[in-house]
Image (spheres, rainbow, N blue to C red):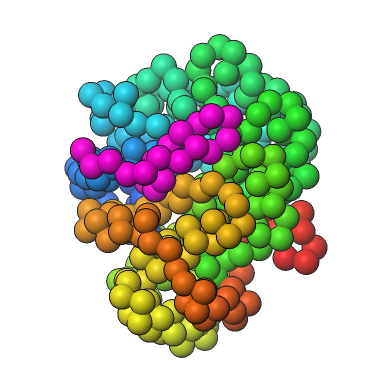
Amino acid sequence: MTALPSVALGDDLHVSALGYGGMSLSDVYGPVDDETALATLTHAVDSGLTFVDTANIYGAGRSERTISKLLATRRDEITLATKFGIAGGAIGARAVCGRPDYVREQIDLSLGRLGTDHVDLYYQHRVDPDVPIEETVGAMAELVQAGKVRHLGLSEATADELRRAHAVHPIAAVQTEWSVVSRDVESSVVPTAAELGVGFVPYSPLSRAWLTDAFAPEQIGDGDGRPKFPRFAPENLTANAGLRAEFLDIAEGAGLTGAQLALAWLYTRADVIGIRIAPIPGSRFPAHVDEWLPAVTTRLDAATLALLEPFAARIRGDRSFDRNWTSQRGDAAA
């Protein structure tokens, strides 16, 4: 197995500096059979991406069940994260639940699907506006005491919610969309995490493949979840085509692919801010995993950073179908 650099997030949680996003083990970005999904996951872990991220909602448990097949023989190699808090329904029509009884119920269901007695990192996938975060995190902390969970995390929490949660129990990581074209988290969430010593796990670091060389609008077929996001509406894909071409030109000039430039930007930006990160791109294709690897140790020069600086302000279409579904709700300026 290839070794990647390790990064210490918060609460003394050590993970590979690049993780693997397990949502791609389901059909969310196009059909994938279980054998292919397992082969890609195995290749990712063999390549050093031993920080594996999933959620109970991904493929209605399918992602967790696929991961269980690898855990059966390689549990000690993998730092495993899963999530609870999003309940049923299609993208854009789901409910959020943070009740303590739901927390306790969902960990047992996830552990059953994963075939393990503990997860290394357990996230609240979305904060429930109807349940004080102190109550939810208090229930999560009980799972740590019970040995079912080693560390706690939050996904798409606001800076205030992160601070309140961290006061109840140390938060090891906050997971939020962050990329060269999605930078709203830099206004308050990232600085708060850095202040508290909480690590950051950027999801969709490749903007759902839009920042990669391989992306083409015609790839988006029936069942693909991306059209639910405004950025992938046909009119916005057309409006942003020139910006994407600029990005790929900058990548070529730097001797990188689009995916490598996107990841290298994140690592470089995190160094500038002073926060520890472990991005979790996902893919159904082993070749994409190989493409990502050089970015882990690539840092961009000031001239390249300056070229990329305006991209987040220039892109058309929000990153989410509803800002209230994200940490943006905590920042009126976002």
Identify the magenta region: 1-21
Residue 98 within the segment the image draws in magenta: no
Given residues 12 and 246, the one toward you in this image is 12
Residue furthest to the top in view is 146
Lateral position of residue 227 relative to residue 171, left or right:
left
Q: Is residue 60 visible?
A: no
| Total numbered labels | 0
- Across and down, in percent, residue 94 comes to 59, 47
- Across and down, in percent, residue 223 comes to 39, 59
- Across and down, in percent, residue 81 comes to 46, 34
Vertically, is 135 above or below 215? above
Vertically, is 122 above or below 16? above
Residue 35, image quadrant: top left
Residue 287, image quadrant: bottom left
Residue 75, image quadrant: top left
- At x 45%, y 25%, the residue is 119
Q: Is residue 172 visible?
A: yes
- At x 80%, y 63%, the residue is 332
- Across and down, in percent, residue 196 comes to 69, 40
- At x 57%, y 18%, the residue is 144
* Rendered-image quadrant of the C terminus: bottom right
* Rendered-image quadrant of the N terminus: top left
Given residues 111 and 190, the one toward you in this image is 190
Lateral position of residue 252 relative to residue 47, left or right:
right
- At x 46%, y 41%, the residue is 7
Vertically, is 140 above or below 287? above
